[in-house]
Image: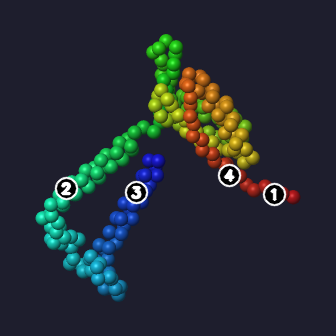
Amino acid sequence: MLRAVNRVLLGLVGVLLLALGLALLLGGLDLASRWGLDLPSAWPWQDPDDVALSDGDRTKWRAEGWWWPVVLAVLAVLAVLLLWWLLAQLRRRRLGEVLVDSGDGAGALLRGRALEDVLAAEAESLKGVGRARVALTGRRSQPGARVGLLLEPHAEPGAAVRQLGAEALEHARASAGLERLPAEVRLRCARHRAERVS
């Protein structure tokens, strides 16, 4: 989800900055009169001597009682959203360690990368799977797995997913002593040349 939010935000900011820059460039270099363009009467910058915000525009609402509370509320919401976005960027995407029940009540820690490597190796040994990538997510006491499988050209996706759940994920769950190991599986098909039928 964060990836989608990043793309949408970057796209919106990019479009807004591009539109604002082109509008300022059009007025600042007097391109409208040079190119013979008829700009709408409400166009804010038509002359190179125009300013982005006039004194009247900047001080228009200051005397209104609602102005400063609205400005402060908008800035507070913007600050909270930016802080959330920054913290989401800094949060680790992978689980560093998994808490394994050792039976003595204290538990043991298993490196997340080790479990990912074992899961990926076992997934790659399944019939029809060319390559596998695994990332552990969630909390160390309740991990989840994101699995990406590259299927060979003649593999059956349903059979590959069933085998993954029954073998690789079940083995990892049992060996780590977890009650459950939910997984999100993404499938891709390896590119191959078309076969000629004679």
Residue in the picture at 44% in, 55% down? 7
Please provide percent x and percent y for residue 42: 28, 79
**Which residue position is annotated with label 4?**
191
Label 3 vs 2, first from the N-terminus: 3
Q: Which mark is residue 196?
A: 1
Q: Which mark is residue 10?
A: 3
Chain-order first, disc 4 or disc 1 = 4
Q: How many marks?
A: 4
Q: CA distance from mark 3 to mark 2?
A: 28 Å
Residue at the extreme left of the image, as rendered: 63
Circle 2 residue: 69
Question: Which mark is in front, 2 or 4?
Answer: 2
Q: Quadrant of the C terminus?
A: bottom right
Q: Are marks 4 and 1 in contact (CB under 8 Å)?
A: no
Whether residues under marks 4 and 3 lie with C-beta atoms below 8 angstroms apart, the answer is no
Q: Amino acid at mark 1?
A: Arg
Crowd class of label 2 (few under 14; some 14 to 19; many from 20; radius 10 Å): few
Q: CA distance from mark 4 to mark 3?
A: 31 Å
- Measure the C-alpha gap from mark 4 to mark 1: 16 Å
Amino acid type, residue under disc 3 in the picture: Leu
**Display coloring:** rainbow
**Labelled pair 1, 3 in contact (Cβ < 8 Å):** no
Please, is residue 196 above or below residue 146 in the view?
A: below
**Mark sitting earlier along the chain (1/3):** 3
Element carrying mark 1: loop
**Relative to residue 92, is residue 71 depicted above or below?**
below
Locate residue 100 relative to residue 38 in the image: left or right: right
